[in-house]
Amino acid sequence: MTPEAAQAGESNRNRMTEAWIVLCTCPEEAADRLARTVVEQKLAACVNITTARSVYRWRGQIETAAESLLIMKVACTHYEDLEQRLRAIHPYELPEILAIPVERGLPAYLAWLADPDAAEPSP
């Protein structure tokens, strides 16, 4: 491998760790509002909303709930602001907010996550 190729590979690896997947559950009726807010405020590039049935322990009781799971794709530089915003607008007393670093991904997609407004339209 040439030094240039090694450096390019290292650059891609560094960029890949700059993208995170942030998971957040919420009541189904709040999902669209939360997702739209974080995308409009450029705190997440994309949010997938899926349904979930949650079973959890809360204050000594086993609870179940029909919820939505928000799967947010985020540049790690936006995480702190995203967390603060979610905490401010989330209806739960203690919202689930978990960040998982992305180790690998399509370089063009990762570049889009870093700056969604700069993406070139597809042909």
Image (cartoon, rainbow, N blue to C red):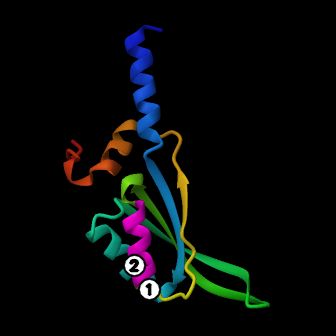
- Specify the segment rendered in magenta: 79-88
Q: Secondary structure at mark 2?
A: helix
Quick check: 52 above or below 39?
below
Left or right: 68 in relation to 7? right
At x 39% / y 68%, what residue is drawn? 82
x and y percent of residue 1 in the render? Answer: 48, 9
Q: Nearer the viewer, residue 61 or 108?
A: 61
Q: Nearer the viewer, residue 10 or 119?
A: 10
Query: Which amino acid, by three-letter code, is at mark 2?
Result: Leu
x and y percent of residue 87 in the render? Answer: 45, 79
Quick check: 114 above or below 51?
above
> Where on the picture, by quarter, is residue 123?
top left
Q: Secondary structure at mark 1?
A: helix
Q: Which residue does the numbered mark 1 point to in the structure image? A: 30
x and y percent of residue 60 in the render? Answer: 79, 90
At x 37% / y 54%, what residue is drawn? 77
Question: Few, some or many C-alpha atoms within 10 Å of disc 2 (few <14, some 14-19, many ≥20)?
Answer: many
Q: Are marks 1 and 2 in contact (CB under 8 Å)?
A: yes
Question: Few, some or many C-alpha atoms within 10 Å of disc 1 (few <14, some 14-19, many ≥20)?
Answer: some
> Where on the picture, by quarter, is residue 53?
bottom right
Left or right: 56 in relation to 100? right
Q: Does residue 81 belong to the magenta stretch?
A: yes
Q: Which residue does the numbered mark 2 point to in the structure image? A: 34
> Where on the picture, by quarter, is residue 64?
bottom right
Quick check: 60 above or below 98?
below
